[in-house]
Image (cartoon, rainbow, N blue to C red):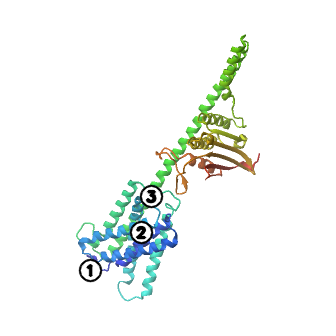
Amino acid sequence: MITQLLPDIPRELTGFAEWSACLVYVLLLRKRMRWRRLVPVLAVGLGAQIGVQMLAGTFPLALWSFGMALAVVTMFGTIWAAARVTVREAGYFCARALVLAELVAALHWQLHCYFFVEGRHPLTLRALVFALVYLGAFALAWLIERRHFGPEAPLDITRRDLASAAAIAGVTFLVSNLSFLTANSPFSGRLGLEIFYIRTLVDLCGFVALYAQQGQHLAQRAAAELRAIDDILRTQHAQYLVSKRSMDRINRKYHDLKHQIGVIRAEMDPGRQATYLDELEASVQTYEQQARTGNGVLDVLLTTKSMAAAERDIDLTCVADGQALDFLSVMDICTVVGNALDNAIEGAQAVPDTEKRLVKLALHSRNGLTVFTVENYFTGELRTEDGQIVTKHADRDSHGYGLKSIRYTAEKYGGSMTVHAADNWFSLRVLLPAPDGRQR
């Protein structure tokens, strides 16, 4: 074994490295508790991690894998106890922390053996190298991983992600430590300090592989969201075109009915005449009540959504200056207004009391800003994850992108979208800066 020629990493340093790697990811994620309670939990985790490593050092070589399994379980417990994560997510970050700990510990010990294994050197100098390597490496790892993880970033760790991370961590750990278990294998090293270099290099490759895996996962999720949002944009635009054609047919029918009413008025029987007139006027009254906002696209949307709301016993009231949206494209108007009203109607429809099925829309320009607000009464509780409202539909892959598409469209014009819920009222507000700061 190589440890007969060169000293291996002390167990207490290995335990400290494993705890420090767990701390990196705990600091990146949402905390499970406040700091005054979190610090004692982390302190217990540090003591447990070093204690498990010291205990594993007393095991015979045949139980080496069992000792490492205990260390990994302790890391898992520290992450799960300190961060607000699920069991699957804790396992995923435990795998990442194991590779990071092995990398930093291997790098430090490689430098230590190169500079200090022969001769006498002051303890302060060795402590300084230890502090610089550990602080620098873990701080750099925190900065690198911050691009992928954060307190408000959704994790969305799947079983496949966990299995891939565990496989990468397992293979990395096995290959990097193979030379310390046996020299009689095709993949074992036999050249002293070069073995430490191989271990560091393998651990670095494992960390890079895990980083690339997460980057690919985020890219795939972003691409899926963009496809879903694009589908919503096209669907809303298609609905607008269908609604416009329907309104054209309704207008033609309305004018035809007015002529029919004139014929009926020539009916000689006063009773029958009055009956026919009442029936016809009642049948066309709904179609005659079209929105007139000054924007043709908005008129179509408000008219069709009002009819949809009326069919569900929802009172939809609108106060809108349609010309405030003249600088938006047809598709973007459909996206913002269509999705906002669809969500509001869906929320109001779930209210048992029909008297409280209310939706309010307001649109106006003020101080160079176009302000669009939709409010609706709702019952029950809103589901949130990582500070974001999530869909109530079971099929979350196909739903829940309405608000995201509105936010995406608003930000495209340099604006913003905010939501607020209080006292059973849900409010969505979109602020859009008018081009050249113009104000109506």
Query: Is residue 4 or residue 218 the one in the foreground?
Result: 218
The x, y position of residue 91, in whole percent, is 39, 62
**CA gap, disc 1 and disc 2:** 33 Å
Mark 2 surroundings within 10 Å by alpha-carbon count, few (fewer than 14), some (14 through 19), many (20 or more): many
Looking at the image, is mark 3 or mark 2 earlier in the sequence? 2
Disc 2 designates what residue?
78
Query: Is residue 113 or residue 100 the one in the foreground?
Result: 100
Amino acid type indicated by mark 1: Gln
**CA gap, disc 3 and disc 2:** 22 Å
Disc 1 designates what residue?
4
Q: Residue at x 22, y 70 (%)?
A: 184
The x, y position of residue 362, in whole percent, is 69, 44
Disc 3 secondary structure class: helix
Disc 2 secondary structure class: helix
Amino acid type indicated by mark 2: Thr
Q: Quadrant of residue 312?
A: top right
The x, y position of residue 215, in whole percent, is 46, 57
Label 3 or label 1, whichever lies nearer to me, is: 3
Q: Is residue 406 visible?
A: yes
Disc 3 designates what residue?
214
Q: Residue at x 34, y 77 (%)?
A: 11
